[in-house]
């Protein structure tokens, strides 16, 4: 018996040809769907039980979610970063201390420093440095204070700065946060 896992665009015609050739087939798909002449299993374990051959068309997930222990935990609705296609995508970081409390209320320099520390920790967790950053997106609540952020940022990107976008927003999700910074980095080979 051949077990076929995942009946995507190519799976159904393959199973139909094997059934037509007289092969005994058991199929399983996340979205319930059957193929005439094949047994439809209730779950993956049932599908592969007793199979001589197991065929799968399911591709591996190409995005890996990351939540390093070196930064304050998320609220569970997002990941601190994801890896995909040789790139690291770091979610926007705000100036939270290790207990999740805001650092430096109304102090752009202190908040900027803390945000860069958090970004650095996430980058380091994946073997990256600030030199690997290809793009930075910054959200500030007051563009007139951008220079205060720039002084701190320039210490982390002293030469060949990455591509950058800066946007003024009316507020951020943490009351009192003055900026949020997200980054994209090239992962080491």
Image (tube, grey):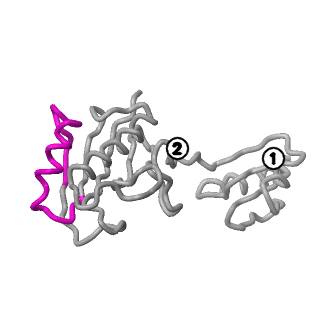
Labels 1 and 2: the sequence-earlier one: 1
In the figure, is residue 135 to the left or right of 19? left
Residue 154, image x, y percentages? 16, 39
Mark 2 neighbour density, 10 Å: few (under 14) some (14–19) many (20 or more): few
Q: Which x, y percent locates residue 98?
A: 45, 49
Q: Classify mark 2: helix, strand or loop.
A: loop
At label 1, counting other C-alpha atoms closer than 10 Å, the crowd grade (few under 14, some 14-19, many 20 or more) is many
Helix, strand or loop for disc 1: strand
Q: Nearer the viewer, mark 1 or mark 2?
A: 2
Percent x, y for residue 37?
82, 62
Is residue 148 part of the magenta span, yes or no? yes
What residue did someone put label 1 on? 2
Q: In this view, does 177 lie above or below 115?
A: below
Answer with left or right where residue 109 lies relative to residue 85: left
Q: What residue appears at the point 75 percent right and 65 percent down from the top-left corner?
A: 34
Which residue corresponds to mark 2? Answer: 69
Q: Which of 123 and 189 is in front in this view?
A: 123
Question: Which image quarter: residue 189?
Answer: top left
* Distance of label 1 from label 2 (alpha carbons): 43 Å
- What residue is shown at x 36% (from left), y 58% (from top)? 102
Query: Nearest the camera: 150 or 65?
Result: 150
> Is residue 34 shown above or below 159?
below
| Numbered range of the magenta stretch | 139-165
Q: Which of 76 and 26 is in front in this view?
A: 76
């Amino acid at each position: 018996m051949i077990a076929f896992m995942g009946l995507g665009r190519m799976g159904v015609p393959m199973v139909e040809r094997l059934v037509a050739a007289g092969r005994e087939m058991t199929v399983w798909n996340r979205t319930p769907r059957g193929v005439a002449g094949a047994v439809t299993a209730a779950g993956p374990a049932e599908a592969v039980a007793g199979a001589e051959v197991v065929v799968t068309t399911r591709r591996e997930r190409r995005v890996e979610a990351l939540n390093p222990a070196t930064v304050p935990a998320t609220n569970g609705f997002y990941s601190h970063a994801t890896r995909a296609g040789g790139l690291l995508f770091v979610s926007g970081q705000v100036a939270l201390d290790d207990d999740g409390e805001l650092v430096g209320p109304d102090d752009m320099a202190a908040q900027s420093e803390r945000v860069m520390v958090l970004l650095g920790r996430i980058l380091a967790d994946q073997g990256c440095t600030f030199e690997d950053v290809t793009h930075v997106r910054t959200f500030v609540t007051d563009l007139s204070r951008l220079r205060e952020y720039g002084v701190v940022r320039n210490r982390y990107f002293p030469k060949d700065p990455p591509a950058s976008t800066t946007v003024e927003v009316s507020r951020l999700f943490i009351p009192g946060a003055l900026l949020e910074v997200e980054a994209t980095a090239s992962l080491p080979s």
